[in-house]
Image (cartoon, helix red, strand yellow):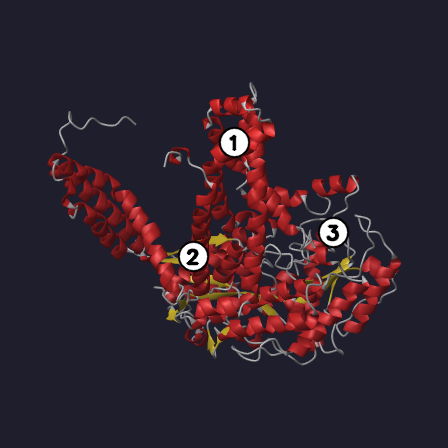
Amino acid sequence: MPEPRSGRRRPLSRRAVLAAAAVGLSTALTASLSACSSSGDVSSGGVTLTFSWWGNDDRAARTRKAVELFEKEHPGVEVRTSNADFGSYMQKLATQAAGGGIPDVAQLDYRQISQYAGGGTLLPLGDSVENGTIRTSEMDEEFVRTGTFEGKQYALPMGRGITGYAYDSTVYQKAGIPTPQPGWTWEEWAQANRRIAALGLKSPDGRDMVGANDNGVNEDIFEDWLRSRGGKLYKSQTELGFTEDDLTEFWTFCDKLREEGVVAEAKDTSQASTTELSPMGRGLAAADFTWDAPFPGYPALLGDQVHFAPVPTADGRQGAYFKPSMLLGVGSNSEHPEEAAELVDFLLNDERAGDILGFTRSTPPNRTIAARVAKTLEGAEKEIYEYAQKMESYGLDAPPPAPPRGDVAIQTAFKRAYHRVMYELTSPREAAREFIDEAERELRS
Amino acid sequence: MSTVSTRAPARADRPAQSRPPAKRRRPRRREQQWPAYVFLTPWMLGAAVLTLVPMAVSLYLSFTDYNLFDPPQWVGLRNYQEMLTEDPRFWRSVGTTLLYVVVAVPLKLLLALGAAMLLKNLGRGRAFYRSAFYAPSLLGASMTIALVWRALFNDGGSVVDILGSVGIDTGGWVGNPDLAIYVIVLLTVWQFGAPMVIFLAGLQQISPELYEAAALDGAGRWRQFVSVTVPMLSPVVFFNLVLEMIQSFQVFTPAFAVSGGEGGPADSTMFYTLYLYERGFTASHMGYAAAMAWLLLIAIGIITLILFRTSRSWVFYADEEGR
């Protein structure tokens, strides 16, 4: 840009400059003020609710459809929806909470309940449940309790998930292993892995196929293992429920199987971020521990011979439990808590909403809706529904209360600590000690 | 929100009103500075609101325990103390970052200098090759390239296969804690284009007479390089070194992409910044993360200072000759 020759031009008058500045500033101000007020604005005469969730496109499309139905039934109520993938949703919600306002209705992860309820971000829903705005009569009482914090109801489960074991039944038959039953033991599981490895089946990259993935990285499976022995992950909101010895035993067990070469190698376990990249997905292993919701991905990838079995036990006592895969909560700063509670109830208990939503958030907690939707299921989705029924009749211990605040960090720390064992950078006991140190620091803060 | 934006302009305006009377001999100039400040206001507002205020807040947060939900609680130096004395992963991340800086920066600069030397004497194709070598610097920061890189060095990736076919069986680098960091080092080194262009400019500044004089004195190519090129180029080397060092300490994107955000396997690519991010955004310890950020700033400051101090003994500025 050419530099203006200052001598020639008349300097701008002070008044003009001030006027320009005033205009500039006031626009900036209005912009920021209007940005502040827009969150609470009310559409003509009616009520505007905000509702956000995470999940894939299918879930988004179905949820929007259900929300439209809600709007039709509640004239004057407008629902603004937004959704994102899990990672960015978590960060966005945390930032919103810090900034003083999550949406009126928000989908929450089990691990967030303590943090959000304890921080005053969520509205207690006890009254709405008692006066029947949110109906829970069709839900399992213990399961509803997963949405409580310090005895108060802060959120309601929206889907019910359970851990399990995806396995290739053809390989199991070849190795002469009987179909895994709800009471099968970790010892039987270890033997099964040895038999499969002994078959010498070739995986696509030429290595011998092993029995399963290395579950030492998986805190969920460790929890099942602990519960099966009568233990638990957390004693309270500030204390771990297991000792260094417990964890050392678990990790030593996993470590030995890997050293024997009957479960997946370290480099394959460390890259198992999705179904496709898991040792089983890559054809390197015959089985994989997984949740029920992602299970249908395995038969879709590998074929119908893949079935869903229970997690092994110590001596017949099942450690798996029904966990809320996600919950619904109402923001404590909501201007329309009534309508927000109605929306929560609609999504959980309305039959038509149930039909629309299907199993997109795994098994609906409302029994009638679950049974109704289940009739329309087929293939892998039907299998997980039947699996849940089977486990329910086998008898499971009650789910623990919502995990403490530090749980998110503790879960990643668990995986990382076992990685160091897996790559032989440290011993199981040392890793257990370091992990417990870290977890305790996390729970203290 | 609104309080910040009303207060900030007042602060930004202040320098205009309290100008020191140094320029009194030309009063008209003073008058004309008004518009300048008005037009600078948006920038100054931006600097204040988007940089200075967050920095101040971050400094404050580094002395607090803040989980995004509860109000920050003052804990004094505890974050710093915990970091330095109780957190083994902090020190591992420091070690990983130092290893990365010490390997990647010299490699990248050597490659950049080598390429610049080759290009300097190239006649016709220079513009083409210069752009070709520079392209990775433009592309390299992107997430996509990092993911491609990950695929190349993974089990079954082209690089691993090619190495295997010539008898070097390394296995996938991404899943190997001893090699994973070098996937990221190579990705960085590959982006040598930016320092190369600066070296090239520096090389062209060196007067050909110096080479002629050296040649007359019987200096061979190597001797010319050591006695003419290196000292004449030392300010540029120094500039590139400082710049690359600062950038390398802050490496984040490639490590995040190659390790899927986890710094794995077994923390082998858990760089300082990645650990900082994890502490802040996964574990919600914003105070701790802020403290880590300030410690990094201080560390980079000290290392830069040391580089500047040592530079006196090896950086040669032509205009200092007569002093």
> Looking at the image, can residue A38 be seen?
no
> Whole-Å distance between the Cαs marked 1 and 3?
54 Å
| Location of residue A215 by image quarter | bottom right
The one of B238 and A125 positioned closer to us in this rendering = B238
Q: State the residue at coordinates (55%, 23%).
A: B215
Q: State the residue at coordinates (46%, 44%).
A: B313
Picture coordinates of residue A161, whole percent (x, y): 62, 66
User: Mark 3 falls on what kind of element?
Assistant: loop
Of all residues, the one furthest to the top in this rendering is B124
Amino acid at circle 3:
Arg
The residue that disc 1 covers is B229
Residue B298 marker: 2
> Whole-Å distance between the Cαs marked 3 and 2?
46 Å
Q: Chain of mark 1?
A: B
Amino acid at circle 2:
Ile
The residue that disc 3 covers is A282
Contact flag, marks 2 and 1 (Cβ < 8 Å): no
